[in-house]
Amino acid sequence: MADLPEKGKGGRTVLAALGVLVTAVALYYLVDTFISSAREAGGAAHLFSFDPFLFSVSMVFLTLHLLAAAWSWQLVCRRAGSRITFRQAFSIHFLAQVGKYVPGKVWGAVGKVGLSRKAGMSSLQTGHALVLETLFIVSACLIVSLPVVPVAAAELGLGVGLSVVAVTVAAMVVTLTAHPGAFRRLISLAGRLTGKDLDFEDPGFANVIRLLPVYILVFLLQGVAFVYLARSFGMDLPMLPGAFLMPTAVGVGFLVLFSPGGLGIREVSLVWLLETAMPGTDAGTASLVSLAARLWITLGEVLAFFAAIGWWGGRKTLQTLREIRRKQSSD
């Protein structure tokens, strides 16, 4: 059994290498498409225009999205039995966000566990909150993607009605997993896999299900912000179905575990969705908007990260992150 850690390390290395490869190929495709389209148009200036006012509007909605994301973490922690403040939730959420760019989707969670412990949450409470958060991210993404499903299914040659039913059923199944009966089985399975006796405080299904509209709001704010971003680059993207395209692409990137932060996967998915929702859209403009969306949302997260450092305390933040890193290395 002594070689199990090495096997696990080897698996993580393969996933990391695969993630880097997929990201590199996807980004190369997007950049090459933009350069080729700009060349055909007679220069990048002929491919798009930039409206600072619309970009500012997109930043306002992006800020609301980020605040709602922090609020959703506070609410999910409270359902798990903690009483953390919005300030603590904001700091924990955005200090841990950098971990999502590490392949495997686990390091952001590890950061949240360590930071939440510093805020007085137990490991069981944080674990409960993380599982609930994951369930509602997936179910909210599926629900918000429903308006896009008919167009996407038709483009792929799939049955529209069957596709809508399949996505709806999937969203219902994921949501119902948060029911205490199903959730207890999920926690039991996690306990057997980790070799620990895990339990959770049952907040009641009615209280838990109230989180779903909050997560839907988080993604809708992101979608509306993206519409204004696309318009700021000269793309005449309608609010419907435009507001549902970015959340759908985010959901695809979230589910691809080997892609750090969905990098590359999200962008290629978004280009395809833009071209599907708006037939005749120039591939170069779609690629530009997709790449700009990544830089734009990363800018928002970086600003939120520094705001979280200020709220958490600069020296205290560095000390806490070092402790979490040492704990990761020892584990």
Image (cartoon, helix red, strand yellow):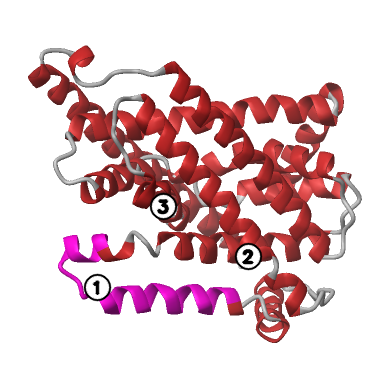
**174 within the magenta span:** yes
Tell me, for residue 212, which label it has, or none. Answer: 2
Residue at position x 87%, y 46% from top?
85
Q: State the image coordinates of residue 196 (x, y, percent, origin top left).
A: 77, 72
**280 within the magenta span:** no
Q: State the image coordinates of residue 20 (x, y, percent, origin top left).
A: 38, 39
* Mark 3, secondary structure of its residue: helix
- Residues packed near mark 2 inside 10 Å, few (<14), some (14 to 19) or many (20 plus): some
Mark 1 or mark 3, earlier in chain: 1
- Residues packed near mark 1 inside 10 Å, few (<14), some (14 to 19) or many (20 plus): some
Q: As shown in the figure, which amino acid type bears the numbered disc 1? A: Val
For the N terminus, give its image quadrant. bottom right
Q: Which image quadrant is residue 329 in?
A: top right
Residue at position x 80%, y 65% from top?
79
Q: Is residue 100 left or right of residue 116?
A: left
Residue at position x 29%, y 34% from top?
236
Tell me the residue that label 3 is attached to: 244
Mark 2 or mark 1, earlier in chain: 1
Q: Determine contact: label 3, label 2, CB under 8 Å.
A: no
Q: State the image coordinates of residue 40 (x, y, percent, origin top left).
A: 8, 20
For the stretch drawn in magenta, the main secondary structure is: helix
Q: Can residue 331 be seen from the camera position used here?
A: no
